[in-house]
Image (cartoon, rainbow, N blue to C red):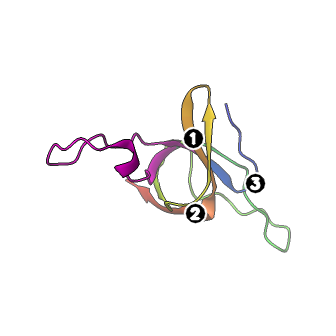
Amino acid sequence: MLQPIGDRVVVKVKKEEEETVGGIVLASNAKEKPTQGEVVAVGAGAYAENGDKLPMTVKTGDVVLYDKYSGTNVTYEGEKYLVLHEKDILAIIK
């Protein structure tokens, strides 16, 4: 499994919608980039300027909303993941 370092988070990307609410099937280039996923691993956290370790806000299993253009796409063992900084996560979906 991928283990992020620092304040990075590994997110399993939510599958893209194949069709619209009206039932129209979308071509792959017409689909929007996913912005939701499940956190599968978190790093140890970042350090403040004074040397104190800052705790991570998200934890494994959280479903999150992240910025559309953030992170690095990674394919590991056939699964799509996104590695991003915790600051690029906009919200936890409950």
Q: Amino acid at mark 2?
A: Asp
Residue at (79% x, 70% y) in the render: 48
Crowding near the residue tagged with mark 1, few <14, some 14–19, many ≥20 C-alpha atoms within 10 Å: many
At mark 1, the secondary structure is strand
Residue at the extreme right of the image, as rendered: 51
Q: Residues within 10 Å of mark 3 (few under 14, many from 20)?
A: some
Q: Earlier in the sequence, mark 1 or mark 3?
A: 3
Quadrant location of the N terminus? Answer: top right
Where in the figure is residue 68, as x and y percent of width and height? 49, 60
Residue found farthest to the left: 22
Apparent side of residue 58 relative to residue 17 in the rendered image (left or right): right
Distance between the alpha carbons at the discs numbered 3 and 2: 14 Å
Task: Say which label, 3 or 2, has the lower sequence index.
Answer: 3
**In screen coordinates, is 20 left or right of 42?**
left
Residue located beneath label 2 in the image: 88
Q: Please report whichever mark, 2 or 1, sits nearer to the chain's N-terminal start.
A: 1
Residue 2 picture location, percent across and down: 68, 36
Q: Amino acid at mark 1?
A: Tyr
Of residues 29 and 93, the one nearer the viewer is 29
Q: Which residue occupies 85% across, 74% down?
A: 50
Q: Are marks 2 and 1 in contact (CB under 8 Å)?
A: no
Tag 2: Cα neighbours inside 10 Å, few (<14), some, or many (≥20)? some
Real-space CA distance between mark 2 and mark 1, rounded to the nearest whole angstrom? 15 Å
Does 67 appear in magenta?
no
Residue position marked by numbered label 3 in the rendering: 6
- Residue type, mark 3 in image: Gly
Residue furthest to the bottom in view is: 49
Which residue carries the number 1 mark?
A: 81
Is 48 placed above or below 58 here?
A: below
Query: Which residues are the magenta region?
Result: 10-38
The reply to whether the C-beta atoms of the residues labelled 1 and 3 are less than 8 Å apart is: no
